[in-house]
Amino acid sequence: MAINVDLVYKTVLLIINKEQRGYLTPNEFNKIATQVQLEIFESYFETLNQQMRLPQNESEYGDRYKTVQEKLEIFRVIGDATFTPGTPNYFTTPNSSGVPSGSQTFATVNNQTAYTLTTITQAQVENSNVVVTLDGLDYTDFNIIGGVFNLTAGSIAAGSTLLIVLYPNDFYKLGTVLYKDDKEVQAVQRNELAQMNMSTLTKPSEYFPVYVYEGEKIIVYPQNIMSNISVTYLRKPADVAWNFTNNNYYVWDPSSSVNFELDVSEQSTVILEILKYAGVTIKDPMIVQAASQELAANEINEKQ
């Protein structure tokens, strides 16, 4: 279960208000929240390294190594590697897992060729594969500069819908390399490959392929393997976004917002870390829990 971005933002605002520390705009919150999520995500790998050196608890729920692996499961992806001929031949990992990080919809206006982005940012655009459709069909006559979507072939008559979807370059860490989907390719170092090539018994073959991972290139041996290579990998979390529909006052737009992808057990940690970036240090986590409970009670009262 993911962490709801609206609940986190409202909790942060409630605590900041009680501490009389000013205000955190949605754009400021989104930047801080994305950074905090990435830091917690990256901390999992240090935790795994530490836990691998310790004796594990046999209790099903007490095994911290297993717990962290489960938290990472949502970020595991499998995709096809792209072949590039050369000296040597090599494969590259997928840039994007296909999980969208944000979207923007515009209703076209007569004689208008420029539309200002509001629910996605220029920074997101520059780190993503951008797919645009016009009334459901692919559209390519555009550029995005300085947070503005520009129609390069002229304006479009009113009544059409432009949809921009961002697919981030979210590759993070290589996992397993596979040949023909079921044969694991062994990772080796250059010196190991040299030793293997010295004997016909250990020399790489299509039955026992190996690879060297250098400079983000997967160099597979034997070199006559030019297709059917896939990889498992970890992707980065999608950027967090608390988006809104009214520029005069902020009204949450759940349809274009992006929740945290971290496990819900990280919710208090997320809030505390965002507060630190906002200049508020809370030593007692119970304050966060109390604020969350207060918000939940308010929402129930509003519904009633």
Image: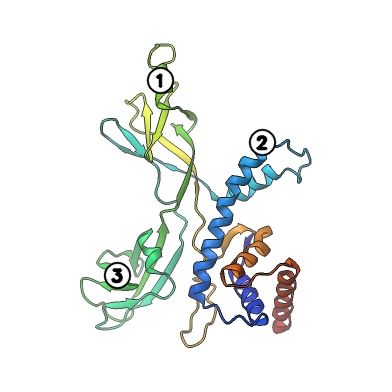
The residue sitting at 59% across, 45% down in the picture is: 46
- Image-quadrant location for residue 82: top left
Residue to which mark 1 is pinned:
204
Tell which circle, 1 or 2, labels the residue nearer the N-terminal end: 2
Q: State the SS at label 3.
A: strand
- Seen in the image, is 256 located left or right of residue 136? right
Residue to which mark 2 is pinned:
53
Question: Which part of the image, by quadrant, shows the C terminus?
Answer: bottom right
Contact between labelled residues 3 and 2, with CB atoms less than 8 Å apart: no
Name the kind of residue labelled 3 in the image.
Answer: Ile
Tell which circle, 1 or 3, labels the residue nearer the N-terminal end: 3
Label number found at residue 145? 3
Q: State the SS at label 1.
A: loop
Closer to the camera in the image, 87 or 109: 87
- Image-quadrant location for residue 270: bottom right
Q: Residue furthest bottom?
A: 248
Give the mark toward the camera: 1 or 2: 2
